[in-house]
Image: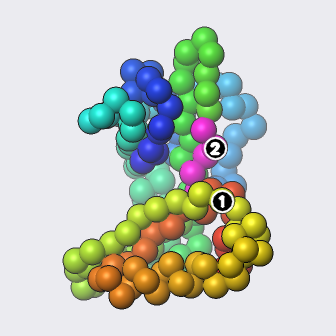
Amino acid sequence: SFAHTLSAAHVLHWMCKVQVAGDMDSEESSVVGWNAAATVSFSGFLSITTCRLPDSVAEQLRGDLDLMSSSLTFEVSLRTLSSRPWVPEPLRLCGRRKPTQRRLLSACTTTLHGADRIHKIAPHAIEDWINYHLLIGIEHFTIYDNDGSYEPYL
């Protein structure tokens, strides 16, 4: 899913493509592999767009998890066919096994600033943020690292 804060993003017709990282085709303009996405907005300001996981990717993900490996990474891309398109950066996701114990409270967020900048200002900011949220009851975190800068710190 993508969260949009663009004005009127919820009225655009979005298309999505989900594929295993490394299997990217070189012709982005082709419509092959692009499927309709579903977008909903409850406020008119924030929109959530979801894409269906293709069976081929789901099979690869299931097979990878059966091998107890978490190396499968896939990428979700969005685009619109409007005359003045805005194309968000693709979202890279990695497969994980479903937890055996049900979690009561999880946090899902994305980073706002590059890690190097934050690390220079406050070297332990990421650890402090996670520890604070553990103290108030968050049991699991999903942090989307859009630019890849947080990988050394997480």
Disc 1 element = loop
- How many dots with numbers? 2
Q: Position of residue 13 (x, y in %)?
A: 43, 22
Above or below, comparing residue 10 to residue 113 in the picture: above
In the image, the segment drawn in magenta is 88-93
User: Is 136 on the left-hand or right-hand side of 54?
Assistant: left
Label 1 sits on residue: 113
The answer to whether mark 2 and mark 1 are in CB contact below 8 A is no
Label 2 sits on residue: 89
The answer to if 15 sits in the magenta stretch is no
Q: Nearer the viewer, mark 2 or mark 1?
A: 1
Taking depth in this image into account, of 60 and 44 the one nearest to the observer is: 44
Pointer 2 or 1: first along the chain: 2
Residue 73 shows up from this direction = yes
- Seen from this angle, which residue lies furthest front? 121
Residue 67 shows up from this direction = no
- Residue at 27% of width from left, 74% of height from top? 105
Disc 2 element = loop
Above or below, comparing residue 34 to residue 107 in the picture: above
Please identify the quarter of the rendering in which residue 148 is found: bottom right
Please identify the quarter of the rendering in which residue 134 is found: bottom left
Say what amino acid the circle numbered 1 marks: His
- Crowd tier of the residue under label 1, counting other residues whose Cα lies within 10 Å: few below 14, some 14–19, many 20 or above: few
Taking depth in this image into account, of 103 and 97 the one nearest to the observer is: 103
- Residue at 44% of width from left, 23% of height from top? 8
Looking at the figure, which quarter contains the C terminus? Answer: bottom right
Say what amino acid the circle numbered 2 marks: Glu
Q: CA distance from mark 2 to mark 1?
A: 15 Å
Q: Position of residue 24 (x, y in %)?
A: 68, 46
